[in-house]
Amino acid sequence: MYKTEAFEGPLDLLLYLITKHKLNINDIPIFQIVEQYTAYVRQMQEEKLDVASEFLEMAARLVYIKTVSLLPTQTEAEELKKELQGELIEYQALKDAAKKLGAQTGGFDLFTRGPAPFKRDMVYTRLHEPGDILKAYLNAAGRNFRRMPPPIEAFKKIVATKIIAVGDKISDLMTRLTKDKRISFKKYLYVSESRSDLVAKFLAVLELCKSKEIYIDGDGEDFDIMRREEGTADGID
């Protein structure tokens, strides 16, 4: 008759059965160990003992391994068997280590001496990146010191800037050339309300030259912008 108090879990019981019947832990005869284990669990149930769920789970696991071992293809059975053998070997190694440790110390509750005070070095010696230190500080300081979005005033100048469309300047220039045959390039750019206006005028001149709607005449510091008439071949595009 088994005593359940002697076993700490299903692996402990399996190791007991393997040792008692002199079985090879590296090649467990699964059919034999299933019968012995289930007989033990059945005996506990008959005696109305409180059977832990882990013992029942192991019984179901062993029965499943036995079932798949009866199939023509036993690949799954071998894998499950190796997995169980690995757990048993690891558990046996832990028990041996605990036994050796207990023998060396004279027991887990035995201390050779009490805790002694020791001098602590409070100098912090670890090194950190400056960016990491800043992030840690901001997180510790709270939301008031964290990096916030720029104020609305910072966007006023950008939003207030008028966007000049190049297409509008193309239409304006062609209208002026219809009235004035020649327009000074320098004066045309000089009379600009803003930098955006100047850039838009310059791009308009380039676009009209490209499409051969106008041409540039003259050399030196200033040029004249003229509308290209049909059959006109002179001037600089």
Image (cartoon, rainbow, N blue to C red):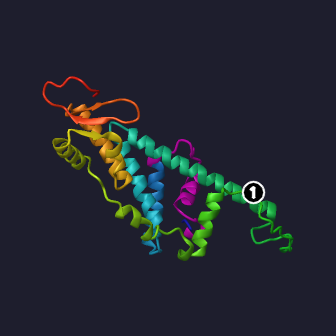
* Mark 1 crowdedness (10 Å alpha carbons): few <14, some 14-19, many ≥20: few
- Identify the residue position indicated by label 1 in the image: 100
Q: Which residues are magenta?
A: 4-31
The quarter of the rendered structure image containing the N terminus is bottom right
Q: Amino acid at mark 1?
A: Lys
In the image, what residue occupies the spot 44% across and 75% down?
A: 48
Residue in the picture at 45% in, 58% down: 58
Give the percent coordinates (x, y) of residue 186.
36, 42
Indicate yes or no whether the magenta region holds residue 16: yes
Determine whether the residue tagged by mark 1 lies in a helix, strand or loop.
Answer: helix
Image quarter in which the C terminus is found: top left
Q: Is residue 29 visible?
A: no
| Label tally | 1
Compared to residue 1, the image places residue 207 above or below, namely: above
| Viewer-closest of 171 and 180 | 180
Image location of residue 105, percent across then percent down: 80, 64
Q: Position of residue 22 (x, y in %)?
A: 59, 48
Q: Nearer the viewer, residue 198 or 7?
A: 198
Is residue 182 positioned above or below 199 on the image? Answer: above
| Residue 116 in which image quadrant | bottom right
Give whichever of 236, 79 is nearer the camera: 236
Task: Report if residue 49 lies within the magenta region.
Answer: no
